[in-house]
Amino acid sequence: MQQRLVAILLDHVVGTLMFGILFFAVNMNSFIHPTDSNAMIPFESFNTVLGFGILYYLLKDLYKGRSIGKRIMGLVVTDENNNEAIPGAIRLITRNITVLIWPIELITLILMRRRIGDLIAKTNVNAVVYSK
């Protein structure tokens, strides 16, 4: 459970850094050389950059069922009925849609040891088992 919470925190840090870097890159000229004509650009670009941030959260587990945080912590998303099977893309995206209600997800994870997204997509998060 502790590994999973650390993985969630790491994924959040990665997502926030990506969002911040992208937001700064898109708006660099407005920040460095502010003028009346470019003053609104950061506000206008916010939703687009936020869209990329949300996309990261939805797609973060698509590569072999492991986000950056899960890779660092040695975790993988697996099928609820088969701990060796990685769910398909639709189920991995479905389980991450509920990240948008993250406070409820966090409470559910602490109380039930599974996120709402795991319950909906019928997935588990397990330690990676390496075979020789």
Image (cartoon, helix red, strand yellow):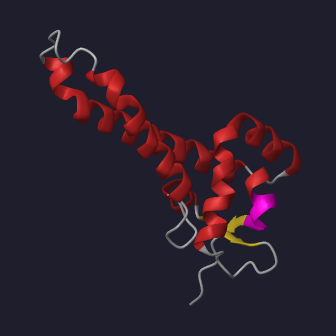
Label total for image: 0
Q: Quadrant of residue 39?
A: top left
Residue at x 52% of width, y 47% of height: 11
Towards the viewer: 23 or 7:
23
Q: Residue at x 61, y 47 (%)?
A: 8
Is 55 above or below relative to 71? above
Give the quadrant of the C terminus: bottom right
View extreme (right): residue: 112
Q: Position of residue 92 (x, y in %)?
A: 63, 65
**Is 24 on the left or on the right of 79, as rendered?**
left
Residue drawn 68% across the image and 39% down it: 102
Q: Quadrant of residue 83?
A: bottom right
Residue found farthest to the left: 33
Q: Which span is picked out in magenta? A: 118-124
Q: Position of residue 4 (x, y in %)?
A: 67, 52
Q: Is residue 66 magenta?
A: no
Above or below residue 7? Residue 51 is above
Q: Residue at 31% of width from left, 36% of height from top?
A: 21
- Near-viewer residue (89 or 83): 89
Q: Nearer the viewer, residue 50 or 102?
A: 50
The location of residue 80, given as percent across then percent down, is 79, 72
Q: Describe residue 44's horizontal placement relative to residue 112 as left or right.
A: left
